[in-house]
Amino acid sequence: MTLAPDVIVGQGTPAIRALRQATSSIPLVMAAINDPVEQGFVSSLARPGGNITGFSFIDFQMVGKWLEMLKEAAPGVSRAVLMFNPDTAPHYYVYLRSFEAVPRSIAVEVTAAPVRNTDEIENAIAKLGRDPGGGLIIASDVFAVVHNQSFIRLAEQHRLPAVYFNRTSVAQGALMSYGPDIYDVFRRSASYVDRILKGEKPADLPIQQPTKFELAINLKTAQALGLQISDKLLALADEVIE
């Protein structure tokens, strides 16, 4: 690379994939990446190897909580669609695999809805909203960040309860979110940059998992959907918008 930086920080699969192709010598710190082992970016979480280390974002053991919380907030949900872009989230099948561990008592059928543009988003959400019992799960994906407003607007339009991975969506009108604190992940990533600049090698720095998770609920949106959020869920929330 012509700039020859001492260390590079990247976020998301497309960015890390491009950086990995560009250099095998400059240290790369992943600020937030889903399942770096499955995607082939590192050899293992404990011993990454090569020039890449950093911080994972979604712990796939917690993915089932999206479904559990969606069902808790909207008991009438019987069909949930996991929406993602397979180009920017090639690891999507790990999400689906994680849902298999959800207790059968939840009794919600989960299917995948790969979308690559606005038209596909609109068609998929409109299809889900045609019959009662539909629910939406927006997976961690840079595509979802870019199209966040579209997801929120269409979920509202078709009266679909939805759970998102990022807390900022709730402030913008989404029903609820559960996921790692992205700001905490970035702050912790800075410590790895500091350690690498002081001489440590990425190969020796283990991949760190998220440690701080947040639940946010928008009661205005719940009311608009005709939902009564349980006291149990409200007690767990880090933020409640009234």
Image (cartoon, rainbow, N blue to C red):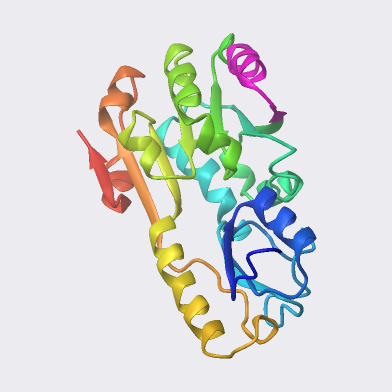
In the figure, residue 117 lies in which quadrant?
top right
Residue 60 location (% of width, % of height): 62, 57
Give the side of residue 165 with respect to residue 46, left or right. Answer: left
Residue 153 vs 143, above or below: the answer is above
Residue 138 location (% of width, % of height): 55, 36
Looking at the picture, tell me which residue is in the foreground, 224 or 15.
15
Which secondary structure type mostly characterizes the magenta part of the structure? Answer: helix
- State which quarter of the image contains the N terminus: bottom right
Q: Residue furthest top?
A: 130
Q: Residue at x 38, y 54 (%)?
A: 214
User: Would you say residue 118 sits in the magenta stretch?
Assistant: yes
* Residue 101 shows in this picture: no
Q: Residue furthest bottom?
A: 199
Q: Residue furthest front?
A: 2
In the figure, residue 51 lies in which quadrant?
bottom right
Magenta region:
113-128
User: Would you say residue 123 sits in the magenta stretch?
Assistant: yes
Give the side of residue 126 with respect to residue 76, left or right. Answer: right
Residue 35 vs 68, above or below: the answer is below
